[in-house]
Image (cartoon, rainbow, N blue to C red):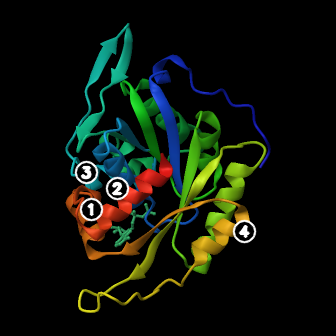
Amino acid sequence: VKPRQVKKIEEPPLSGIKNIVAISSGKGGVGKSTVSSNLAVALALKGYSVGLLDADIYGPSVPKMFATEDARPYVEKVDGKDRIIPVEKYGVKLLSIGYFVNPTDALVWRGAMATSAVRQLIADGLWGDLDYLLIDLPPGTGDIHLTIVQTIALTGAVVVSTPQDVALADARKGISMFQGKQINVPVLGLVENMAWFTPAELPENRYYIFGQGGCRKLAEETGTPLLGEIPIVQSIREGGDEGMPAALNTDSITGVAFSKLADAVV
Ligand code: ADP
C-alpha cells in the first residue's frame, strides 16, 4: 500500500476527547465487537466517561449488543453546525452506522463513502467530554480499514484474536499495519478471546478449544503486551444477543475478566 497524505480530523469537535482507542482484529468473528462493548461498559462502571463508535460498516453490532436497534439519534444545531447526539446506554455514549443505514445498503459502499461516514460520526457526534472513545473497527487490514486508521488521531490500538493459527496470522498483519511507518499508532496490546472453555460441571478444567498460549507467543514475538484472556462463556454470547453486555455482571467471572481488561487498557 502506498503512503498517502490524509487530512486528520479537525481538532475542535474532538477537543473534549482525551483518548481515542481503536479495537481491531485481523479476522472477523473473533469477538472484536464483544470485546469493544464489554470494555466500554467495564470502563464506564469504573467511572470513566466513555463513548463507543461502531465503525464496522459491513457488520455493525453495537445496536444489537446494546439493545438499541430502534434508536434513531437526534441531530441538534450547535454553533450553527449539525451535531449528532449519541444514544446512551449503560453509561456509554453510542453511535453506530447501524442507526442510520440499512447494513445491506452499506455493503455496496466504496471505500471513500465508508470512510467519510465514519469520519462524520466521529467529528459530528456530540460526544462531550470523554476519557475514552473506543472505535470498533471493521475487521481486517484492507483499504477502508487503513484509511479510517490514517484519518483519525488515535491514541492507540487494541488487537483482538483467538489463539487459533489462522486468526493469529491475521492479527500479526494487524499489528504490523499499526506499527508501520505510514500509520505509526502504538499497539496498546493484544486480547486473547475464546481462550479456553470451562464446563459448569468441571469447574477446575480448562479446555483449550482454539489452542493454548497463541496470543502470549504473538505478544512476545511482536513486543506487545498481552492485555487479557477472555474465556468462552455462554453468558458472554447471551449478553451479546440480548443487548446486556456480560461486563454488567460485575460479580461474575466474566465481569471480573472485563474489569481486569479495562484496568490493563487505562
Ligand atoms: P467480531 O466482532 O470479531 O466479528 P463478535 O464480537 O460479533 O465478533 O463475536 C462473534 C460471536 O461470538 C458472537 O455471537 C459473540 O456473542 C460470540 N462471542 C464472542 N466472544 C465470546 C466469548 N468469549 N464467549 C462466548 N461467545 C463469544
Query: Neighbour class for label 2 at 10 Å: few (<14), some, many (≥20)?
Result: many
Q: Is residue 252 left or right of residue 162?
A: left
Q: Three-letter amino acid code at disc 1? A: Ala
Q: Earlier in the sequence, mark 2 or mark 1?
A: 2
What distance separates the C-alpha of mark 2 from that of mark 1?
7 Å
**Residue highlighted by disc 2:** 38
Front in this rendered view, residue 181 or 5: 181
The amino acid type of the residue labelled 4 equals: Glu
Q: Residue 217, which numbered label?
A: none
Sequence-wise, the earlier of marks 1 and 3 is 3
Disc 3 target residue:
66
- Per the image, the residue denoted by label 4 is 221
Q: Residues within 10 Å of mark 1 (few under 14, many from 20)?
A: many
Of the two numbered discs 4 and 2 on the same chain, state the one appearing first in sequence.
2
Q: CA distance from mark 2 to mark 3?
A: 10 Å
State yes or no: Cβ of the residue under disc 3 lies below 8 Å from any atom of ligand 1.
no
